C-alpha cells in the first residue's frame, strides 16, 4: 500500500482534530491541517517515518522546508509544496481571508470523491479525481461555491495547472490557484 499526505498550515488546529483519509485500493491518502509551519514539519517527519512516500504541502512552505524534510527521508520519498505562478501569487496576496480552501488530488477513482474538514479557522474541501476533465469540473464547482483559493496535488504539471487556472478565472478571476506539481 502506498501512502500520500496533503498537509496544510491551519491556525489552532491539530491532525488529531482536523484530518481525514481515503483509501482508493492502492493509495492511502491523508489530508490534515496543523497549527504552524513547525508543527506541519514535525508531523511530516512522523509520516515519513510511518512510510508516507509522497507528501504535498500547502503554499506556506518553500525549498528550505523540503530540504529539511528530505535529509532523513528514505530514498524514493517525494515532497512538494504548492507554488503559485506570479499572477496567482498576486491574487493570493490580495485575499482578505482564506477560510474556504479547495484541494484537488488525483486518486484511483472513477467518480469524484469528496472529503470535508470544517473548523472556524478553515474549511478544507478536498476532492479526489481521476483525470484533468474531472479536475476542471471540480475546480469550476469550487469557484462557484465560493472557495477563497485552490491548491493542486503534485500530479498537476504546468499545462494542467494552467487549465485549472483558466477554468477558475472564467467564474471568479480573484481565486488563486497553486500547484504542488510546478516549481518556479
Image (cartoon, rainbow, N blue to C red):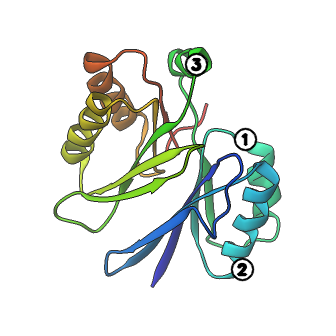
Q: Position of residue 91 (x, y in %)?
A: 52, 17
Instruction: Give the spatial CA distance, label 2 vs label 1.
Output: 21 Å
Q: Which residue is mark 1?
A: 62
Marks 3 and 2, Cα distance to the nearest angstrom? 37 Å
Q: Residues within 10 Å of mark 3 (few under 14, many from 20)?
A: few
* Nearer-N-terminus badge (1/3): 1
Considering only vertical position in the picture, is 39 above or below 22? above
Percent coordinates x, y for residue 84 in the rendering: 55, 29
Which residue is disc 2 drawn over?
49
Circle 1 SS class = loop
- Whether tag 3 and tag 2 are in contact, CB under 8 A, the answer is no
| Residue at screen point 32% across, 75% down | 24
Q: Nearer the viewer, residue 176 or 74?
A: 176
Nearest the viewer among 21 and 88 is 21
Q: Which residue of the protein is positioned furthest toward the front in this rendering?
A: 120
Answer yes or no: do the residues labelled 1 and 3 have beta carbons within 8 Å?
no
Residue 125 versus residue 166 in the image, above or below? below
Question: Which is closer to the viewer, label 1 or label 3?
Answer: 3
Q: Residue at x 68, y 39 (%)?
A: 60
Q: Position of residue 170 (x, y in %)?
A: 25, 17
Vertical position of residue 6 compared to residue 143: above or below: below
Disc 3 target residue: 96
Amino acid at each position: 500500500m502506498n501512502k500520500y499526505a496533503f498537509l496544510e498550515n491551519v491556525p489552532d488546529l491539530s491532525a488529531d482534530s482536523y484530518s481525514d483519509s481515503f483509501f482508493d485500493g492502492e493509495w492511502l491518502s491523508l489530508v490534515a491541517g496543523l497549527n504552524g509551519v513547525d508543527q506541519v514539519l514535525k508531523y511530516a517527519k512522523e509520516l515519513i517515518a510511518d512510510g508516507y512516500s509522497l507528501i504535498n504541502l500547502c503554499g506556506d512552505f518553500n525549498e528550505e522546508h523540503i530540504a529539511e524534510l528530505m535529509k532523513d527521508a528514505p530514498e524514493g520519498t517525494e515532497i512538494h509544496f504548492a507554488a503559485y505562478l506570479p499572477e496567482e501569487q498576486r491574487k493570493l496576496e490580495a485575499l482578505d481571508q482564506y477560510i474556504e480552501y479547495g484541494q484537488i488530488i488525483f486518486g484511483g477513482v472513477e467518480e469524484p470523491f469528496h472529503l470535508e474538514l470544517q473548523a472556524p479557522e478553515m474549511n478544507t474541501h478536498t476532492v479526489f479525481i481521476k483525470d484533468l476533465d474531472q479536475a476542471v469540473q471540480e475546480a469550476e464547482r469550487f469557484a462557484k461555491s465560493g472557495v477563497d483559493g485552490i491548491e493542486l496535488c503534485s500530479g498537476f504539471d504546468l499545462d494542467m495547472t494552467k487549465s485549472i487556472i483558466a477554468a477558475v478565472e472564467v467564474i471568479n478571476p480573484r481565486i488563486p490557484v497553486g500547484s504542488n506539481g510546478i516549481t518556479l
